[in-house]
Image (cartoon, helix red, strand yellow):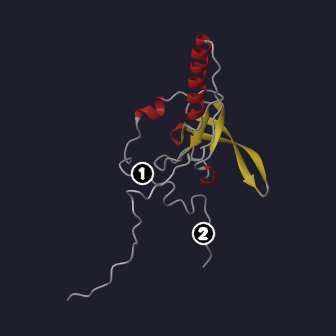
Amino acid sequence: MGHSGGLRAGTRYAFSRGFKEKGMIHMSTYLTQFHIGDIVDIKVNGAVQKGMPHKVYHGKTGVVYNITKSSLGVILYKLVGNRYIEKRVNVRIEHVKHSKCRKEFVDRVKSNAEKKRAAKTAGEHVHLKRQPVQPREARTVTVKDNLPETVTPMPYETTI
């Protein structure tokens, strides 16, 4: 027999609701405000079949370009062969949530602005660029009160 390849083939776990997330959809899902230019994640809610995106877009991040009464237009980039193609997908709001991908960046920008403001009032220069993890500092190990110890495996004994 041939392998069925329908629209929802292979989505047994991807479209299922999570543990303790089954049942009615929260009101906050419908009250969330979206604006054009927002970065959103597409996460399919299996309880709502209307306005459901294709399985290939599940887990993708895009930018909102259109807003209607109950759905959003999202621009995504899909890998086709060796290039990315821009795709415009219309998705109901149950399948979309605000992305947290820029949260760390925005927090860093705010903290850098605060550091810069404080340094300007103090009249000093502050380094704001991120630094990679530096090598550990050199240490000396003395054998004065720390004698080396030979570690050997314990012999195996069968006691029945």
Q: Residue at x 58, y 29 (%)?
A: 108
Badge 1 local density, few (<14 within 10 Å), some, or many (20+)? few
Which residue is most to the front?
A: 144
Q: Please, what secondary structure does the residue beneath circle 1 have?
A: loop
**Dots 2, 1 in contact, CB < 8 A:** no
Front one among 61 and 90: 61
Q: In which quadrant will I find the N terminus?
A: bottom right
Q: Position of residue 96 (x, y in %)?
A: 55, 40
Looking at the rendered structure, which numbered label has been put on residue 18? Answer: 1
Q: Residue at x 45, y 48 (%)?
A: 47
Q: Residue at x 79, y 56 (%)?
A: 82
Q: Please, what secondary structure does the residue beneath circle 2 have?
A: loop
Q: CA distance from mark 2 to mark 1?
A: 26 Å
Amino acid type of the residue tagged 2 in the rendering: Ser
Amino acid type of the residue tagged 1 in the rendering: Gly
Q: Residue at x 60, y 34 (%)?
A: 102
Q: How many numbered discs?
A: 2
| Residue highlighted by disc 2 | 4
